[in-house]
Amino acid sequence: MEFERLEYLVVGAGLWGSVIAERIATVLEKPVRVIDRRSHVGGNCHSYRDPRTGIECHAYGTHIFHTAIPEVWDYIGNFTDFTTYRHKVLTEYKGHVYPMPISLATINNFYDINLKPWEVEAFIAKESGRTGNVSENPPSNLEEKAISLIGRPLYEAFIKGYTQKQWEKDPKELPPEIITRLPVRTNYNIDYFNDPWQGMPVKGYAAIFNRLLDDEKIEVSLGVDFKSIASKISKTCRIFYSGTLDELCDYKFGPLEWRSLRFEQSVEPHPDVQGTSVLNNADLETPWTRTHEFKHLHPERGPQGESSVVSKEFPDSFEIGKIPYYPIETQENKNLHKKYKDMVAETYPSMIVGGRLGDYKYFDMDRTIENALHAFEKFAKDLTR
Ligand SMILES: Cc1cc2nc3c(=O)[nH]c(=O)nc-3n(C[C@H](O)[C@H](O)[C@H](O)COP(=O)(O)OP(=O)(O)OC[C@H]3O[C@@H](n4cnc5c(N)ncnc54)[C@H](O)[C@@H]3O)c2cc1C
């Protein structure tokens, strides 16, 4: 169908847009066009088989599905089964490897001691110099805040270099509010997530998106930017938009701030390079923050050959043209986003905006699905009024 005659258009074939399209086709039983400027569906959750090794790689960094939201777990279960994979993160600091987040295993390894669970709290309090409940001098920057929570040695090993690389700023120049707490586990649980439901999609993320969009009422057009077709769309077309609002409004009030990332991928001549899927690199001297080794995300697939695909993740400043990864959710930016939201409501009165780019919020995949399901439910309810 030509763009001029569309009744439903979804901008963005990421998780948010794909869930919306699936709902329009299944619940409303209406034809819907999905466009994306990229050459693939799945947005940042995109996975693909590396042609050299056959190993499934995550193009935009490792994605682990985890949720505590029953509605989301029930919904996504219609499109994939999950493996029993439970994510563990290790962090490398000065040639030693420790589990993250900080747990009894991290502390005992790092200090070379043998604390018991009930001794951890007093130990951390002593390390951080906490003597009473109320601090007379509240921390004025991130470094002071982190030291007040976990003490200087743990801060310098696990937070300082990583944070400096992530923000390209000395933690002394960052506001204390960036961290509200630094969880310290008093046991040997080294699972990264606490959610009751977690795992990897058995056939990969690409298979989820193929299932979500596998309906004859859904037509997907890749390599298409909304701006290039906007003038063709009729006024009665309902548009669901999951791109950034500053771009949609031609940056009228200036750009929103984001952090970006850059990935360097290589095939290494070892069946196993680092022994785990994600290794944090805490040293300041190592310019990347994380190393991903994708084959470990699917241990149920066996050794997967004699070589391995590794991807190094480098934090990057954002400028127009790069991929916006993480919104910088300061009050100033939230106010700017609100101005754009108001402008979009005026310019495109029937447009529904959502997803991590449209809402300018960091959403994990489960929150993205929840956000899409609720946006659709509200829309469908309004239709029947
Ligand atoms: C490094 C990283 C790791 C992550 N790891 C996890 C994890 O382990 N577990 C987890 O639950 N979540 C994780 N997430 C979060 C997850 O990626 C998001 O929840 C999810 O991708 C959000 O989906 P979305 O559809 O809102 O956005 P996106 O995936 O960004 O999709 C939006 C799509 O819209 C398209 N688009 C934008 N503007 C236009 C336009 N004008 N015209 C046409 N197309 C357009 C884009 O090309 C894109 O494909 C991670 C995020 C990052 C950045």
Image (cartoon, rainbow, N blue to C red):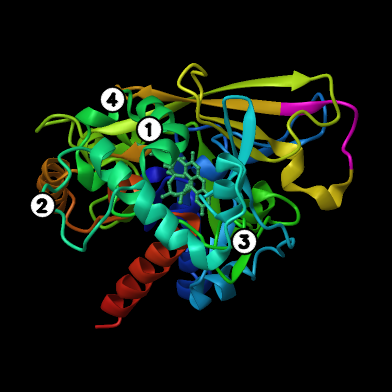
In this figure, which residue is indicated by the disc labeled 4? Answer: 170
- First reached walking from the N terminus: tag 3 or tag 2: 2
Q: Is residue 338 left or right of residue 374?
A: left
* Residue 242 seen in the current view: no
Amino acid of disc 4: Asp
**Along the line of sight, the residue nearer the viewer: 320 or 173:** 173
**Along the line of sight, the residue nearer the viewer: 307 or 169:** 169
- First reached walking from the N terminus: tag 4 or tag 1: 1
Residues tagged 3 and 1 counted as in contact (Cβ below 8 A)? no
Foreground mark, 1 or 2?
Answer: 2
* Measured Cα–Cα span from mark 3 to mark 2: 34 Å
* Measured Cα–Cα span from mark 3 to mark 1: 24 Å
Judge the density around disc 4: few (<14), some (14-19), many (≥20) Cα neighbours within 10 Å. some
Judge the density around disc 3: few (<14), some (14-19), many (≥20) Cα neighbours within 10 Å. some
Q: Where in the figure is residue 143, as x and y percent of width and height?
A: 28, 36
* Measured Cα–Cα span from mark 4 to mark 1: 8 Å
Residues tagged 4 and 3 counted as in contact (Cβ below 8 A)? no
Note whether 46 is above or below 345 in the view shown.
above
Which residue is pictured at 77% across the width and 48% down the height?
298
Q: Is residue 176 left or right of residue 223?
A: left
In this figure, which residue is indicated by the disc labeled 1? Answer: 163
**Magenta stretch secondary structure, dominant:** loop
Foreground mark, 3 or 1?
Answer: 3
Asked which secondary structure carries label 4, the reply is loop
Q: Which mark is residue 136?
A: 2
Q: Where on the image, by quarter, is ligand 1?
A: top left
In this figure, which residue is indicated by the disc labeled 3? Answer: 189
- First reached walking from the N terminus: tag 3 or tag 1: 1
* Residue 203 seen in the current view: yes
Q: Give the residues drawn in magenta, as a range.
A: 303-309
Foreground mark, 2 or 4?
Answer: 2
